[in-house]
Amino acid sequence: MTGLNGSRRLIFGRLVINLKLNCNIKEVTVTQTALGRALNLSPARINQLIDLDVVIRDEKDTSGGVFLFDSVKNYFLSKKAAKEDADLFKEKAIHERVKRQISELKLAREEGRLYEATTVEAVMIEQLVGLRTHLLSLGAKLGAQLEGKSRAEIASVIDREVEERLSELSEYKPELFMNEEQRGTASSDAETRAQAD
């Protein structure tokens, strides 16, 4: 085929070889089909890209030709922008997920379903130290009471005392694990519920 200014174009299947162009490269037009083949796009996709002003149609060309340079440039720029938009969308989704998780944690904390680790640690240490003190004092407390008793009676008294101390630990009180701010919120919530009743 003969092109502008006598240049020749050879077509071998999908391979197009332009031998020489002596014109403004921005004014070179190709058919929509040729552009679709070169970019591996269907005719329908080329038409979509024309509607989106990515592929630029030559209004002077009555056969529907498109500007090669601007169309290819716009196509690759739009692909790059689409990838960046996808990456931005992914980042926004991650950000929103983290914000939701933070909100859920704050709500759980305000409702008394989540406690700070330092508060839990302090309460547990206090309770275990108290238990240790009580258990270590059992010998002095029970020594005189158990003198002269049978083994069964001694075991029963010791078991009762140990179970009594352990039952103190088993009584779950959420207020123990709340910090000052949570206690204030919990007491105001309790007042609101009492007024509603």
Image: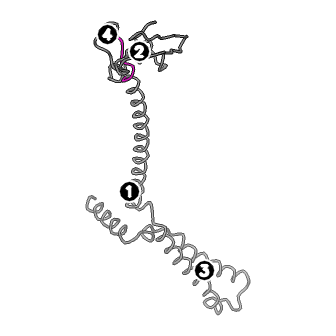
Q: Are marks 3 and 4 in contact (CB under 8 Å)?
A: no
Q: Amino acid at mark 4?
A: Asp
Percent position (x, y) of residue 4? 38, 11
Query: Dot 2 surroundings within 10 Å: few (below 14), some, or many (20 or more)?
Result: few
- Give the class, few, some or many, for how many residues have Cα within 10 Å of label 3's Cα (few <14, many ≥20): some
Give the label, 3 or 1, closer to the camera: 1
Q: Is residue 101 above or below residue 26?
A: below
Residue placed under numbered mark 1 in the picture: 107
Q: Are the residues tagged 2 and 3 within 8 Å (C-beta)?
A: no
Judge from the rendering whether residue 197 lies leftward or rightward of residue 41; answer left or right. left
The spot of residue 18 in percent (x, y) is: 48, 15
Residue 61's disc is: 4
Instruction: Judge depth for marks 2 and 4 and give the one in front.
Output: 4
Q: Residue at x 46, y 71 (%)?
A: 119
Q: CA distance from mark 3 to mark 1?
A: 40 Å
Q: Quick one: which residue is furthest to the right in this view?
A: 151
The residue tagged 3 is 161
Lower sequence index among marks 3 and 4: 4
How many angstroms separate mark 1 from mark 2 (CA)?
Answer: 51 Å
User: For the residue marked with disc 2, what is the amino acid?
Assistant: Ala
Q: Which of the two discs, 3 and 1, labels the residue nearer the N terminus?
A: 1
* Amino acid found under the numbered disc labelled 1: Leu
- Residue range (magenta): 64-70
The residue at the point 67 percent across, 79 percent down is: 156
| Amino acid type assigned to the residue bearing label 3 in the image | Glu
The mark that comes first in sequence, 2 or 4, is 2
Q: At numbered mark 3, what does the secondary structure look like: helix, strand or loop?
A: helix
| Dots 2, 4 in contact, CB < 8 A | no
- What is the C-alpha distance between the residues marked 3 and 4? 102 Å
Q: Residue at x 42, y 30 (%)?
A: 79
Viewer-proximal residue among 39 and 114: 39
